[in-house]
Amino acid sequence: MDPIIEEGYTRLLKELEDLQAKKEESASELRGNVETLLARMGADTAPVVKQIGLEMLRRAKREASGELYDQEFYEKKMIVLGKGDPLPYRPDDPSKPVDVQVCVLDEDGAFHELMYTNTEIRTESYLAPLTPEEAFNVYGYDLVFMLYRALYEYAQKEEELMAALARTLEYLGSR
């Protein structure tokens, strides 16, 4: 092989090796600060939760057909960030099994674990506060990704709305 090609190839391999080492160093540093990152992202996302969040069901009665009625919702809106493997029972009442368990962020920037118990006649929930550390330990990096994705999608929809408003104003001004 040509010495110039060999030298270039060797240099390229060395550069890739250096980049891999830097990547591992950065990933290690991030792992050490992920709870701080998550706390900051939650606090920064909180104002947007009021616009994009959902009113989450607190409890409801269930008809024989499965339809819910007499529904009660939590006061604060929330966004769902991750779904976990349900615990065998709820912390507030060991006689109630957990059917669905999710991590949510409320409009104050607080993380919670929301657990639902479903029976033939009702659906009930339990909302437990989580620190960013606890949330990360249970739900992992999905929380960081989902927070980023929620804001990214919200920004895209806002851009689409602004473009539609601009087109509407342009249409109105064309007469």
Image (cartoon, rainbow, N blue to C red):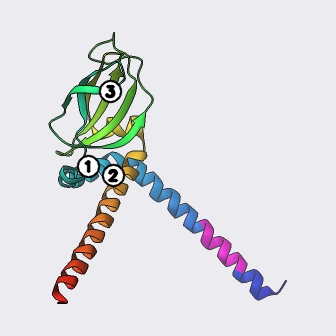
Q: Main secondary structure of the magenta part?
A: helix
- Residue at image position (26%, 17%) is 92
Q: Which disc is residue 147 wearing? A: 2
Q: Position of residue 124 (x, y in %)?
A: 27, 22
Q: What amino acid type is highlighted by mark number 1? A: Gly
Tell us which disc is closer to us: 1 or 3.
3
> In the image shown, does 130 or 34 lie closer to the viewer?
130
Nearer the N terminus, badge 2 or badge 3?
Answer: 3
- Residue 100 vertical placement versus 105 (above, below): above
For the residues marked 1 and 3, what is the alpha-carbon distance in whole angstroms?
34 Å
Q: What amino acid type is highlighted by mark number 3? A: Glu
Are the residues tagged 1 and 3 within 8 Å (C-beta)? Answer: no
Q: Is residue 32 left or right of residue 77?
A: right
For this orientation, the residue located farthest to the right is 1
Q: Position of residue 138 (x, y in %)?
A: 40, 34
Q: Is residue 127 left or right of residue 10?
A: left
Q: Residues within 10 Å of mark 3 (few under 14, many from 20)?
A: few
- Residue 121 vertical placement versus 42 (above, below): above
For the residues marked 1 and 2, what is the alpha-carbon distance in whole angstroms?
8 Å
- Residue at image position (40%, 24%) is 99
